Amino acid sequence: MSAAACYNADTEAASAEETGERLNNLTGKKVVWAALALVLFLAIMVFFYASSRRMDQREADISPVVTVAPTEQPPGEAQTMPPYISPAFLEEDDDWPLSERLFGQLSGQSPGRSPSPVKSMEEARKITGNAAAAAWQYYQNYHQQAEYVTRNGFLFEMPSQSYITAEILEGLEGFDPQYAAEDVMILFIRNEDAQPWFSVDNTEPSAFVICAAYAIADGYCLSYADQTALAPSDAIEDLLARYSSVHGPIARVSSADGAYMSVLSAIEERAGPVDVRYMEGDEKYISAVVSVRSNPLDVRELILERSVDGYQIKIDQIETFERKFAAINQAAPDLNLRMVPPYNLAADLKYLKSDFSSLVGSIRQSGTIAEEDAPVFISGDDEFVYMEFISGERLLAHCGEAAAEKMEWKIYPVLSYDDAYIRMKELSRFSPPPYFLIKQG
């Protein structure tokens, strides 16, 4: 074989080998890319599957387990429930910064801002006299629609959750607008506490009067009606301290708390065995709503005060008070009304029902509870029914406005008081919802 032939053969072999390597490399890259594409596709599928499961789970969490339509309407006269007209308390304590600015006992400073060195007693008298008259007029104008209470010694309006200040009085007929920016304090105190400075009606010592106070260099200029007085700073600070509603944090009282049995004992001494529907308090007072165990329609609301011997009933029969916040405040002006539940039992209790046997029967037929499982607690009205069973099962039944005529109930298993509370808040068409139906203890 010639040298040229050998060279061509070797060259062709090398080219073939090189081409094979290129093909192998190309094939390997395609395999790698295909594998990567497959992995990416699987990852996308897993993502969408997981998202779908999460959405399904979320939907399952808010969807009723079963829809129950009783074959017959529970006995009782049909009534249309009105809105629950009760003061709606804020979830957040938004006005504490204002309190700290106004109240000396909270910030460690004198109430009001720094005494004004440029205001004489005569100038301050004009401010407080005008503000006291305007505040009284404001109270007269709106006290039929709103509940006014003393909060830390200051005039406080319940529906708006606001202190009555000179700024709020601006625009009221008779109020001098040049005083709207002044730091005049509108006080709401008992007759007996105004007597050191003013001549007031002593026939009702616990009745409230409206005064205005303004800080000056010598103390505080006070006005009530057409009377004016000068009060030392420490006297005003002592006065406001007596009305302070700060007695520690407000918290739920559970059966694990030491105060629970003392409170329950005091209530049951008067009412017999009860079921607790609400119990919250601070270090001085406890607000409670209970029902007599033998009659769930007998719902009672009370305030208890702590003493050296435990807890004693301070105010009872609150369920009969149409203006309960004002009534509680008059009896215990230093009680923090945030512990008092927002509903008004005087208006709400007439809508309670006593017989839900057809509803329970329909729930059994749906298989939600066992045939032998019986309710040990049941309380309801036209919109909600809360039930607890021997097995420990808890159910909340809801009848929406659209389903009211057919008495169609949706049944929600609930795990606890909080769970039932949240569910009721989500579903109710009233504000506040009838939380008193739920058993807390």
Image (cartoon, rainbow, N blue to C red):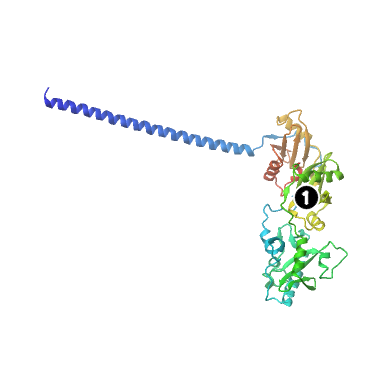
For residue 8, what is the image quadrant? top left
Q: Nearer the viewer, residue 402 or 244?
A: 244
* Amino acid type of the residue that numbered disc 1 sits on in the rendered structure: Ile
Q: Which residue is most to the left?
A: 2
- In this view of the protein, can residue 328 be seen by the observer? yes
- On the image, the x and y values in percent for residue 345 come to 79, 49
- On the image, the x and y values in percent for residue 225 come to 80, 71
- In this view of the protein, can residue 315 be seen by the observer? no
Residue pictured at 34% horizontal, 30% vertical: 28
Residue 20 vs 184, above or below: the answer is above
Residue 128 vs 144, above or below: the answer is below
- On the image, the x and y values in percent for residue 264 come to 81, 44
Which quarter of the image is occupied by the N terminus?
A: top left
Q: Nearer the viewer, residue 400 or 64?
A: 64
Q: Which residue is most to the front?
A: 308
Q: Dot 1, crowdedness within 10 Å: few (<14), some or many (≥20)?
A: many
- On the image, the x and y values in percent for residue 250 come to 72, 51
Residue identified by numbered label 1: 286
Residue pictured at 28% horizontal, 29% vertical: 21
Which quarter of the image is occupied by the C terminus?
A: top right
Residue 135 vs 408, above or below: the answer is below
Residue 58 lies left or right of residue 102; in this view the side is left
Q: Which residue is most to the top?
A: 1
